[in-house]
Image: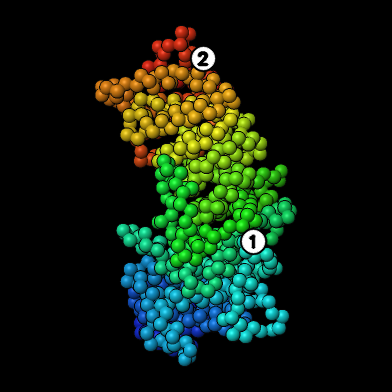
Amino acid sequence: MGSADSKLNFRKAVIQLTTKTQPVEATDDAFWDQFWADTATSVQDVFALVPAAEIRAVREESPSNLATLCYKAVEKLVQGAESGCHSEKERQVVLNCSRLLTRVLPYIFEDPDWRGFFWSTVPGAGRGGGEEEDENARPLAESLLLAIADLLFCPDFTVQSHRRNNVDSAEDVHSLDSCEYIWEAGVGFAHSPQPNYIHDMNRMELLKLLLTCFSEAMYLPPSPESGSPNPWVQFFCSTENRHALPLFTSLLNTVCAYDPVGYGIPYNHLLFSDYREPLVEEAAQVLIVTLDHDSATSTTPTVDGTTTGTAMDDADPPGPENLFVNYLSRIHREEDFQFILKGIARLLSNPLLQTYLPNSTKKIQFHQELLVLFWKLCDFNKKFLFFVLKSSDVLDILVPILYFLNDARADQSRVGLMHIGVFILLLLSGERNFGVRLNKPYSVRVPMDIPAFTGTHADLLIVVFHKIITSGHQRLQPLFDCLLTIVVNVSPYLKSLSMVTANKLLHLLEAFSTTWFLFSASQNHHLVFFLLEVFNNIIQYQFDGNSNLVYAIIRKRGVFHQLANLPTDPPSIHKALQRRKKTPEPLSRAGSQEGASMEGSRPAAPAEPGTLKTSLVATPGIDKLTEKSQVSEDGTLRSLEPESKPSSVEGSLSEG
C-alpha cells in the first residue's frame, strides 16, 4: 500500500469516528483496525490528519467512541509487549498506536470530566484470553506504562537481540533480563551496543508517549494539593516496573555518552542527520521529569540566597518509593561520577565551541534540560556534589553556565534558565573547594560580550554577574540577592582580582548605595550589606594579592563616606525619592553608563518595561571610577552630596 493510500485510509477512519453519533462496539475490529493495522503513518501525518478540533468534537459528542479508541490503542500496545513484536506488521501497529495516543492524550487531560479516565478499569471489555482477565483489574494508565516499559527493551525493536536464531519465543519476553540490554555503556554497564538508527527512532517514539503521559500535571489547575506526586511518574518509578533500573541507567548513559561533535569532521551535521540527538534530548527530558518526584522534600532552602550551608547537610538518601531517585542517590563509584561529569560538561560546553570555519560544528539546543539534570544530581547525590567540587572539571561546568546566564540576561522568556543557572552556582559556592578553584587563570576565550580582562575564573564570574545586574531585564531583580550571596561565599578564597573586576564591584556598591535606590524598597539595603561583606572578607583573608581592589576602594572612598552619612530623616528621604521621580533617566544606557566596551548591554533595552519601580538604568557609570576629581585634595567629601550625583556623572566619560 502506498503512502498516499495509507494516509487516505487513515483520514477516512478519523472522519468516520468524528461523524458517528452511535457508540462503536469495542469488538468491531474491522472499524478500529483502520487506525493502526493497515497504515504506515509518520508522527507528522498523525498530527496533521487528526486535528485538535475533531478530537474535541468526538470527546464532547461521542465520548464512548473516544474512550474505546484509547482503550483499543492501549490494548494493542499491551499485546505488542506480550508477543515481543516479532513481525514488521506488529511493530508498525505498536508505532501507530503510540503516535495516536501521543496525539490524543493531551485532549483527555485538558478536560476535568475525563481526568480519572486512565485511572479506571474498562468494564466488560474482555481481552479475549483467560490469563489476561486479571490484567483487567489494572487501571488503563498502569497497563499503558508497563507496556511502554516492556517495549523499550524489546529485542529487534528497541534493543539489539542477543539471539542469532530467527525468533525469540514469547516466554523469553517475560524472562528477559533487561539489565543485559541497557542502551549505552557507562554507569553500571560496560558494553556499548552497536548504534542502530531504527532502534533509536523507536525508542524516541515510545519516550515521547511516556512524556505525554507524564504531562497530565500541566493540565491540572493550581491547588494546595499541587505538591502531591504525579501518579503517572509515581507508578512508572515504582517496584511495579521491573525495568526501572535498566531504563534509568539507559537514559542516564545515553545522555552522558553522547558526543555531538563525533570525529570532528567539519560540517558533518549538514551532510547527514544525527538521529542520536533527538533521542538524547528525549532521554534528558524523561529523566528530569521522573526525578522531579521528590522535589517537595529536597533541600530547597539552598535557593533563597541565605542558607546555602544546608546543601551539604543531611546526607540521608531519599526514600525508595521513587526508584529513579533512589538509584541516582546510590551511585558512588568514582569512575561513574567521572563519566557523568565529563558527559554533562562536554554537552554544556558544546554551544561555546569556536572553530575557524563558521557553523562547522553541531550545536545542541537542550542545555536547559542538562542544567536541571545537573541540579538533580547534586541535590539527590551528595557524594556526586563533593566529587564535582574537588574535581578541576567543575570549571567546565561553571564557564558554560556563565555563558548561558550572560546570553539569556536580556530575554524575559528565558528567566527559568537564569534561575536554574544561578541556583546551581549558589549550591556550588557553599563549599570552600569551589572558591579555591576559581583562582585558576581564565585563558580559554569564550565568545561573550563582556569587557576584556586578564585574570581568573573569579574575575569572569564577577564581570558576568555585574553585566546581569546592570543590563539584565527587570524580572531578574529577585536574583540579585543570590548573585551577591555567591560572591560573598567565594570571596574569602579569591587571591587576586583584576582591576576590571575591582572596578565592577565598586560600581555595584555605588549603584546600590544611592539614596533613591536604598530607600525605594525595604530589602534593597541587603545588597549593600553583601558587597561590604565581600570587601571585608577579601581585605581580612586575601589582602596581599588584592592590591587592585584595595586601590579601587581607596579611590572611591567617597562612596563609603557618603554611605556613613546617609540621611535618615523623613524629609531627606522623601526629597531623594521625589528627585528620582522627576528625573527618571538622567543616564541613558547607550550613553555614559558602560561605554563602548559594554556593547552587550544594549539589547536589553527592549525588555525594560517591567513591573518593578526601581531599576539600575540611571545608576552612576563605571567611568566614574577613574575620575580624578571625585576625591578632593584634602580627602574630604565636599562634592559628594547625593543631589549632585546625576549631574556630575553625565560629564564623566573618561573610561577608555
- Colour mapping: rainbow
Q: Around disc 2, counting alpha carbons within 10 Å, would you say few (fewer than 14), some (14 to 19), or many (20 or more)?
A: few
Three-letter amino acid code at the position of disc 1: Gly
Q: Around disc 1, counting alpha carbons within 10 Å, would you say few (fewer than 14), some (14 to 19), or many (20 or more)?
A: many
Q: CA distance from mark 1 to mark 2?
A: 60 Å
Residue that appears at 66% across and 36% down: 443
Could you say which quadrant of the image residue 563 lies in? top left
Q: Secondary structure at mark 2?
A: helix
Residue that appears at 56% across and 62% down: 283
1 vs 2, front mark: 1
Quadrant for the N terminus, please. Answer: bottom right
Q: Which residue is mark 2?
A: 628
Residue that appears at 69% across and 84% down: 166
Percent from the top left, x then y, of residue 229? Answer: 40, 63
Residue that appears at 70% across and 68% down: 194
The extreme left residue here reads 571
Percent from the top left, x then y, of residue 248? Answer: 55, 65
Q: Horizontally, is 259 left or right of 533 in the view?
A: right
Q: Which residue is mark 1?
A: 186
Residue 219 vertical position relative to residue 502 in the rendered view, above or below: below
Could you say which quadrant of the image residue 7 lies in? bottom right
Using the image, tell me which numbered label, if any, was put on residue 600.
Answer: none
Residue in front for this viewpoint, 218 or 26: 218
Q: Secondary structure at mark 1?
A: loop
Three-letter amino acid code at the position of disc 2: Lys
The extreme top residue here reads 634
Percent from the top left, x then y, of residue 216? Answer: 41, 66
Q: How many marks?
A: 2
Q: Horizontally, is 594 left or right of 183 in the view?
A: left
